Amino acid sequence: MAATRMISIIGRKNAGKTTLLVALAAELVRRKFRVMTIKHGTHPADMDQQGKDTWRHWHEGKVERVLMEAPGERVLFERTPQESDPITLARRYLDGADIVLVEGFKRAPLPKVEVYRLVAGPEPIFDAAAHDPEDWVAMVTDHPRYRAEFPVFRFSDTAWLVTLANLAWDRAKILAP
């Protein structure tokens, strides 16, 4: 079995991380890769509706895990004593992925693609004084004059997604099987 690759999509709140991750995932799936994702949240996930059976199992029953199986999908809710890093999560839950796209986890030791939009903040997360440019694969931005030691793509450019997908694949961290 081939090793799994991992790369993180980071950026400030409302910069467009999810939009970029979805586009990148679709491009990699189009290439016939098995793509899986991990999303870092800042608050507990509650994807079920109050009063429904799985909600009651979780909230009223206080169970450790709820696994919901339905035609064509499966959802696992699991209580954890602490947050895990994305590499540990991928090894535990995403076996068989060709590539895992991680949204968030900006401090994780993964190569990064940053989404930087001026509306989300005046400065990107990347800071040449604090970060190694080798950790950044690329930046996708709407800043017309932003320059860096790594590839910078403008949202206004055309056909950058194919190039970004190539970079993501080539520069992703490879986990040993």
Image: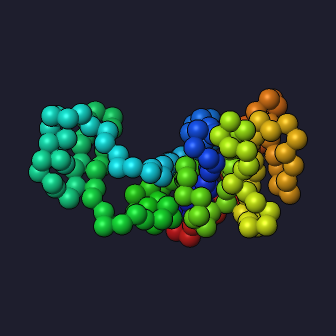
Whether residue 85 sits left or right of residue 125 in the image: it is left
Position above or below: 139 against 70: below
Instruction: Please provide percent x and percent y for residue 4.
Output: 56, 60
Q: Is residue 83 left or right of residue 130?
A: left
Q: Residue at x 29, y 49 (%)?
A: 76
Residue 117: percent from the left, percent from the top? 70, 39
Q: Position of residue 116 (x, y in %)?
A: 71, 44
Residue that extends furthest to the front in the rendered view of this protein: 122
Query: Can residue 29 be seen at all in this image of the molecule?
Result: no
Figure quadrant of residue 110? bottom right
Q: Residue at x 44, y 61 (%)?
A: 89
- Residue 135 lies, with reference to residue 144, above or below; the image says below
The answer to whether residue 146 shows anywhere in this view is yes
Q: Is residue 3 left or right of residue 171?
A: left
Q: Quadrant of residue 157?
A: top right
Numbered-mark total:
0
Who's the residue at 74% across and 67% down the image? Answer: 130
Q: Residue at x 61, y 54 (%)?
A: 8
Q: Is residue 40 above or below residue 16?
A: below
- Coloration mode: rainbow
Q: Position of residue 66 (x, y in %)?
A: 21, 50
